[in-house]
Image (cartoon, rainbow, N blue to C red):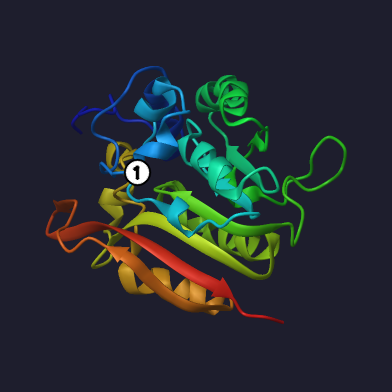
Amino acid sequence: MSEGCCGPALDQTQAVDKRYGAAALEQETCLCTPVAFDASLLKVIPEEVVQRDYGCGDPTRWVRSGDTVLDLGSGSGKNAFICAQVVGGHGAVIGVDRNAYMLELARVAAPVVAERIGYSNVRFLEGAIEALDAPTPTGELLIPSASVDVVLSNCVLNLVNPSARSALLANIRRVLRPSGRVAISDIVCDRPVPQHLQQDPELWSGCISGAWEEDAFLADFRALGFEDVSYADRYEQPWRVVEGIEFRAVTLTGVLAAG
């Protein structure tokens, strides 16, 4: 197996942790796709945070003033810090990530951003995005039920093992308030990924072999009770083609049905 930009073969979880831990310390150019963000919202964010952000879309465009936002796989914190400015002092942003290096990068930057924008409304929690119902030391859930207005994520859901997808989706629905929203930027594929590609740690950690099938991604969110589910953004050109399978960036949006 080639070493590429991920190094020697590891299992999926180790590969993700090692690759994103290293990417928190030094910018990696082969993770996900370049995306243009509103430059005015980047000015207050430390440069090392911006450089070490890895994504495939801009889900922050669907955040509103006053929202409580949950950023799944918040990484360096760039998306969370953008949202902090959009939601304003009456809103709140919660980032969840399991990578210690990324969390440290985000947490160090948080007071810097707070000073520059004039208020502090962002916090970063350590945890797996598929286990938002994990108990904290005080006995509460990591993210309480019906506590956020919008769940966003940027090229992270595809890093979750398919065996944990049901828990991931159930938790997304659980934490949203009535009429809550999702804005999920991710990589999807046009046909099933064969098992041998799923077992390649380099492709897995590179946002490739864990991709949802394009139609199934929409169907899974509709099955959760979301309405108006669609791809608000969809790249016509594939980001990568591996063994004839097209992988492209999309941003899925939807609103949780009332009741």
How many numbered marks are there? Answer: 1
Q: Nearer the viewer, residue 258 or 144?
A: 258
From the top left corner, tell me how far across and down residue 39 is, in percent: 35, 38
Q: Residues within 10 Å of mark 1 (few under 14, many from 20)?
A: some
Q: Nearer the viewer, residue 155 or 63?
A: 63
Q: Quadrant of residue 98?
A: top right
Which quarter of the image is occupied by the C terminus? bottom right
Query: In the picture, which quadrant includes the N terminus?
Result: top left
Q: In the rendering, at what x and y percent does residue 151 appear?
A: 57, 56
Residue 147: percent from left, percent from top: 74, 57
Percent x, y of residue 254: 50, 71
Q: Amino acid at mark 1?
A: Phe
Residue, disc 1: 37
Apparent side of residue 223 relative to residue 203 in the rendered image (left or right)? right
As drawn, 1 above or below 211: above
Residue plotted at (46% across, 51% down) = 60
Q: Residue at x 27, y 59 (%)?
A: 193
Q: Is residue 157 visible?
A: no
Check the image and report above or below for 19 versus 230. Answer: above
Quarter where residue 92 is shown: top right
Q: Is residue 95 left or right of residue 163?
A: right
Q: Above or below — where is 175 with respect to 47? A: below
**Furthest-right residue in this view:** 138
For residue 157, side relative to residue 180 (left or right): left
Q: In the image, is 20 to the left or to the right of 32?
A: right
Q: For the point 24% across and 30% down, which residue is it?
A: 29
Whether residue 205 is visible to the viewer of this picture, yes or no, is yes
For label 1, the SS is: loop
Q: Residue at x 76, y 59 (%)?
A: 145
